[in-house]
Image (spheres, coloured by chain):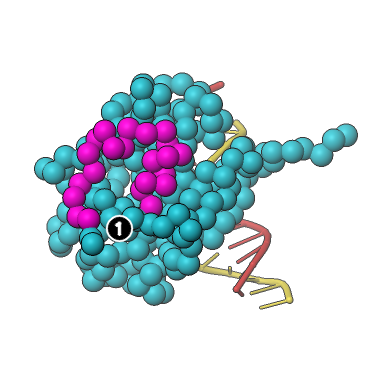
Chain colours: A cyan, B red, C yellow
Amino acid sequence: MRVDRLFRREELALDPVDLARLLLGAVLEADAPEGRIGVRLVEVEAYRGLDDPASHCYRGKTPRNAVMWGPAGHLYVYFVYGMHFCANVVGTEDGQPGAVLLRAGEVVEGADIVRKRRPNARGNGELAKGPAILTSVLGLAREQNGLDLTDPGSPVRLRAGERVPADNVRTGPRVGVAMAMDTPWRFWIDGSPAVSTYRRGGKRRQVRPAG
DNA sequence: TCAATGATGGTCT
DNA sequence: GACCATCATTGAT
């Protein structure tokens, strides 16, 4: 049976690692000028705050990451690499900052709109493959930072999708992250064509050769 | 099909 | 001034 309701804030007030598993299969929906676009999340990454060196929160509160210290269920959008935005769902619990990066999804509503925006995409399953692509497909940018995804009146909302069986969920190290390679906080739905390909992080390696 | 690389600008030290 | 939670393109198999 299909579950269609919006998430409530208290359901999302979890440790980001737990929130990441919950978000797999959920549908992020946004109102675009041309119509409604819905994306079923198939790949996410957890970023805890204070004890996670890879998190934007690790070095403390700044104007950029302030949203992650706020209530759960809000949208954290940040600008990266000069040309891209990435979107997160805030998973703050008991005042601890943290969020879940949305890495990839399958377009389940408004695919015709998305295809016009991204004529170069191969198959329908790969219309939202990659965090910056997913973010742009939904029309999210700086102005959407801080939106409440649990508010029915918000232009961007988060719906509970069909529950994903635990057997279908795989884990691994996070993409593009050089530190904390031993924490498998990337979660994805096995077999989805939209799951992005893994790339290791930049210069720093977890273990530097001795000598 | 896969690995290497340039584009590009905000954020923090 | 260095560092990026990236993408599309290029060039080598």
Q: Residue at x 44, y 66 (%)?
A: A192
How many marks overall? Answer: 1
Give the left or right position of residue A9, taking residue A174 as reference.
Answer: left
Q: Chain of mark 1?
A: A
Query: Which residues, given as a range, are shown in magenta?
Result: A3-24
Q: Nearer the viewer, residue A103 or A8?
A: A8
Residue A9's image quarter?
Answer: top left
Asked whether residue A156 appears in the rendered view, the answer is no
Give the left or right position of residue A187, taking residue A208 as reference.
Answer: left
SS of the residue under disc 1: loop
Asked whether residue A60 appears in the rendered view, the answer is yes
Residue indicated by mark 1? A162
Q: What kind of residue is marked 1?
A: Glu
Q: Residue furthest right?
A: A211
Residue C2's image quarter?
Answer: top right
Residue A170 position in % (x across, y down): 52, 55
Q: Nearer the viewer, residue A27 or A122?
A: A27
Q: Residue at x 61, y 37 (%)?
A: A180
Q: Quadrant location of the N terminus of chain A?
A: bottom left
Residue A178 position in % (x across, y down): 62, 41
Q: Quadrant location of the C terminus of chain A?
A: top right
Residue A93 vertical position relative to residue C4 in the rendered view, above or below: above
Residue A144 vertical position relative to residue A95 in the rendered view, above or below: below
Would residue A10 be counted in the magenta stretch?
yes
Residue A36 position in % (x across, y down): 17, 59
Q: Residues within 10 Å of mark 1 (few under 14, many from 20)?
A: some
Residue A190 position in % (x across, y down): 48, 62
Residue A210 vertical position relative to residue A103 in the rendered view, above or below: above
Would residue A80 be counted in the magenta stretch?
no
Q: Residue at x 37, y 34 (%)?
A: A14
Q: Residue at x 25, y 47 (%)?
A: A158
Residue A165's image quarter?
Answer: bottom left
